[in-house]
Amino acid sequence: MPFTVMLSPDAKEYLDSLDDKRARNIRKHLKELEKDPFKPRAACDIDIVAGSGRPPMYRLRMGEFRAVFFVEEQAVFVTDLFPKKRDSAYRQN
């Protein structure tokens, strides 16, 4: 059964602010999460974020960008999109 990917308002705003080429690339990677948001594979570099609590948060690496998401039932909630330079984005405040 496929998953549904949903973006937070902040993630959607960031995605909309990118140029078309980068936005297309990110959308292609996010589409891969519909198949299986847990299993890392080619074109879908997924890792669990250590110390993220419940629900567990995951990181998707997409070239120069990262997405942080969690899964609830058949829905993937992308909470944040950011360039890879922002290493503190994984930490909870």
Image: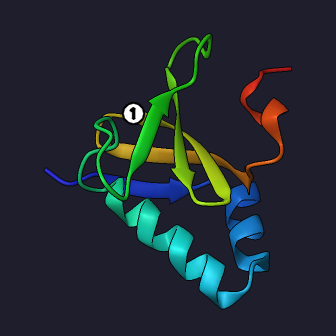
Q: Single out the residue that lies furthest toward the left.
A: 1
Q: Residue at x 75, y 78 (%)?
A: 18
82 to 49, vertically: above or below: below
Residue 4's quadrant in the figure? bottom left
Relative height, residue 82 to residue 50 (above, below) = below
Residue located at (32% from left, 35% from top): 38
Quarter-wise, where is residue 91 in the image?
top right
Q: Is residue 79 above or below residue 42?
A: above
Residue 22 vs 35, above or below: the answer is below
Could you tell me which secondary element the residue under label 1 belongs to?
strand
User: Which image quarter is the C terminus in?
Assistant: top right
Picture residue at 54% right of the left edge, 81% below the top: 24
Instruction: Tell me residue 66's x, y (percent).
Output: 64, 50
Q: What percent of the width, then of the height, locates residue 51?
A: 62, 10
The reply, left or right, for residue 77 in relation to residue 75 is right
Residue 23 in the image: state x and y as whole percent: 62, 78
| Residue named by callout 1 | 72
**Amino acid type, residue under disc 1 in the picture:** Glu
